[in-house]
DNA sequence: ACGAGATAGTCCACAGTGGACCGTCCATAA
DNA sequence: TTATGGACGGTCCACTGTGGACTATCTCGT
């Protein structure tokens, strides 16, 4: 029995395919929509993984449709591999935040650029928080259970914390000041 | 004038070398200690980047010391490149959280494994929060200014938010319950 | 005198990112 | 009617990032 472990991306693809055959293109979109903010998969990687999974017999390639569209579907082996993967312990998270890296060197940043840099990033986080909140309200209204909104809840917690952090930066960095909204 | 842009890792290395010559090994340790939680650089990458930076004339290789230790030092061109890099706008952050990915598929996780998985991760975050807090107290006591503790402040905000998120997960997932501490 | 562990580096396979590029199909506007 | 802009669907590549295996060297405590 050969090494049948899956990386997280492969596991996720199998998981998404439980709902039925999809093309690589669809899978990218589905992943983006499901967990975009806290997991990413790129086109390049999806097609690479799909090919590898098909080679390992975990997926079947469907007939090529219009625009070279090729759906993939789970095989029984793929379904089993997914079940095994989803019951392994998740790897530690990985956060890469260039803004924090730069702030480590804040002494070398031109004083007149820093506030703009900060407020741009802050605005982006505020935008995301608003998006998450409105999406959460919408799903709640549609009766989507809490269990299926935990990622969204995480996003809301996270963005809220980030905004608070921005608003508590030392005044010396935050010359333009921050107005906390919503 | 050729393309003189730096990736974030290269920029960070140059930044760390402002304090004087260091070896790759030291740089890994310094980076880990400075911003370990929100930026990472691995051995392999450091040596790869150092070689590339030296080839571009941004670093000078020092004499090889004991244990093949080779220090690198900034050239004037390197110093200038750093200054340019640190004044570019930081790229968007990138968060990869396998736990959230798995929870997206929580319906397929064995009910008896889920609580353990969650509490392990929660405990790890609690540990980190404690570390950050104690380090922050220590640095504050040493008179390190707030400006040099913003990353730590971010860590504290972040871990606090994550713990709150854990504690508010639907009871159906969190069978063992969570006791918020500290 | 020796073994454990820290120091320092090399190398490789794999994973992940972003952009360039290519064709196809469809709606709509001139 | 045509053409054209944009959405769809995929390939390919260079670069960046991760983790582990492997080597050698030096230090320190017993």
Image (cartoon, coloured by chain):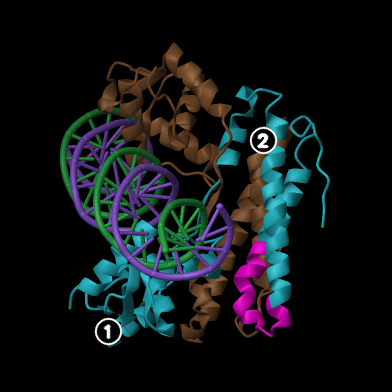
Chain colours: A cyan, B brown, C purple, D green
**For residue A151: magenta?**
yes
Residue B179 seen: no
Image-quadrant location for residue A84? bottom left
Q: In the structure shown, which secondary structural element does the residue marked by tag 2 occupy? A: helix
Residue B89 relative to residue B79: left or right: right
Query: Is residue A35 toward the left or the right of residue B69 in the image?
Result: right
**Label 1 marks which chain's residue?**
A
Q: Within 10 Å of the Cα at label 2, are there few (<14), some (14-19), or many (20+) other Cα atoms?
A: some
| Nearer to me, B101 or B64 | B101
Using the rendered image of the protein, determine whether residue A29 is visible from the camera's viewpoint.
yes
Q: Position of residue A146 (x, y in %)?
A: 66, 80
Q: Chain of mark 2?
A: A
Residue at disc 1, secondary structure:
helix
Label 1, residues with CA under 10 Å away: few <14, some 14-19, many ≥20: few
In front: label 1 or label 2: 2
First in sequence: mark 1 or mark 2?
Answer: 1
Q: Residue at x 40, y 84 (%)?
A: A20
Q: Which residue is mark 2?
A: A117
Q: Is residue B1 magenta?
A: no
Q: Position of residue A79 (x, y in %)?
A: 34, 84
Residue A115 % position (x, y): 72, 32
Q: Is residue B16 above or below residue B111?
A: above
Q: Residue furthest top?
A: B76
Question: What's the magenta region?
Answer: A139-156
Relative height, residue A3 to residue D11 (above, below)? below
CB within 8 Å, label 1 to label 2: no
The residue that disc 1 covers is A77
- Figure disc tally: 2
Numbered badge on residue B143: none
Judge by depth and name the residue closer to the eye, B136 or A40: A40
């Amino acid at each position: 029995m050969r090494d049948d472990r899956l990386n997280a991306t492969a596991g996720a693809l199998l998981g998404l395919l439980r709902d039925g055959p999809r093309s690589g293109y669809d899978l990218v979109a589905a992943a983006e929509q499901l967990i975009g903010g806290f997991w990413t998969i790129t086109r390049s990687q999806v097609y690479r993984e799909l090919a590898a999974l098909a080679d390992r017999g975990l997926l079947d390639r469907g007939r090529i449709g219009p625009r070279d569209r090729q759906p993939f579907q789970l095989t029984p082996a793929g379904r089993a591999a997914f079940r095994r993967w989803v019951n392994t312990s998740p790897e530690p998270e990985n956060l890469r935040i260039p803004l924090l890296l730069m702030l480590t060197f804040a002494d070398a940043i031109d004083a007149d650029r820093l506030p703009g840099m900060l407020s741009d990033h802050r605005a982006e986080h505020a935008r995301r928080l608003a998006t998450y909140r409105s999406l959460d309200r919408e799903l709640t209204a549609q009766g989507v259970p809490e269990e299926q909104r935990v990622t969204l809840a995480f996003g809301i917690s996270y963005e809220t914390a980030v905004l608070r952090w921005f608003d508590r930066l030392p005044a010396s960095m935050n010359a333009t000041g921050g107005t906390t909204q919503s």
